[in-house]
Amino acid sequence: MYRDCTKKIQIGDRVIGGGNPILIQSMTNTRTEDVKATVEQINRLAAAGCDIIRCAVPDAEAARAIREIKKEIRIPLVADIHFDYRLAVEAIENGADKIRINPGNIGGEDRVRTVVAAARERNVPIRVGVNSGSLEKDLVEKYHGVTAEGLVESALEKTGMIEDMGYDNLVISIKSSDVLMCARAHELIAARTKYPLHVGITEAGTLLAGNIKSAVGLGLILSKGIGDTIRVSLTGDPLEEVKSAKLILKTLGLRRGGIEVVSCPTCGRTQIDLIKLANQVEDMVADIPLDLKVAVMGCVVNGPGEAREADIGIAGGKGEGLLIKKGKAVKKVPEDQLLAVLRQELENWSETV
């Protein structure tokens, strides 16, 4: 797999590339200079499973805030810089664990060289980001539009510029809102570089559309052995990004740990509020540190059989339900006690298996 052969890069106390586990990244939507709000959001995201956090640095006040934020968080912080190379330098000086720049929009080569010198002094990785929405005009003309080939050429030109300055502590990100173009671009660049790749579908959209596009796009890319860090970009609460990223990785067999909830669709046999129950179970198990599959079924007729591959589950009937272990019904429970009984079983799981 490509990710087994990528260069190892250290970001704070985390290491990506070289076959290390794929890490989940998200981005704060607070004003970075509001240290209290930013720290609170980062710590919530970290508790949910975020491994690396990115913060916007639009001005000097935000760059200086990094120093205070770093004192209160336990995951690496990436400073997101556009246009002003001085902000990248200041973010590095204030303790950013990585910076994200597009060398094409922060000025000429001399300004890039200044940023590289600051990064080299502290051994801070640089994420070179290329976005389909800001692809250089000459590459758009060369390829008769925005294409995967153009995105790859742009990214390699920029990494080549930094390599020529004697620095190779780099991560590459090439993103597009076009899912198939993005997948194709990652296939092309993975064959041409050894740098770790940060993968995501940019501007994916709202919770529904963004999750579908991200799941399809990330699934295509990750399943080919490509990608060292990921972000699910959603127009919404960053917490949803982390939850979705974890589920994508687990679905692809790329991350273990945590309870996976499976549930059946509703049908005419359903005699309980299955939608509400399934959501309650999903929320309930979020803080239970087990590596299990939990089934929530709406029918006592087929529930035990459908839940056979789960470690434990519940199947609802009219006013009551079944507790199921390994596909076998072990206890009949009043409907209003199903959730509590399931939680009790999970909290005492080591004693029950």
Image (tube, helix red, strand yellow):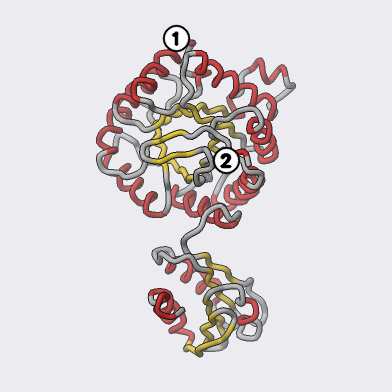
Lateral position of residue 102 relative to residue 14, left or right: right
Distance from the alpha carbon under mark 2 to that under mark 1: 34 Å
The image quarter containing residue 204 is top right
Q: Residue 4 carries which label?
A: 2
- The residue at the point 48 percent across, 11 percent down is 109
Compared to residue 235, the image places residue 129 above or below, namely above
Q: In this view, does 206 lie above or below 32?
A: below
Residue kind at label 2, given as amino acid type: Asp
Q: Nearer the viewer, mark 2 or mark 1?
A: 2
Nearest to the observer: residue 321 or residue 5: 5
User: Relative to residue 203, is residue 32 drawn left or right?
Assistant: left
Looking at the picture, does residue 42 appear above or below residue 332?
above
Q: Position of residue 17 (x, y in %)?
A: 51, 38
Q: Is residue 47 above or below residue 113?
A: below
- Whichever of labels 2 and 1 marks the residue nearer the N terminus, that label is 2
Q: Where is residue 146 in the image (x, y as percent from the top left)?
A: 68, 26
Q: What residue type is labelled 1?
A: Asp
Look at the numbered disc 2 and give the secondary structure of its residue.
helix
Which numbered tag is attached to residue 110?
1
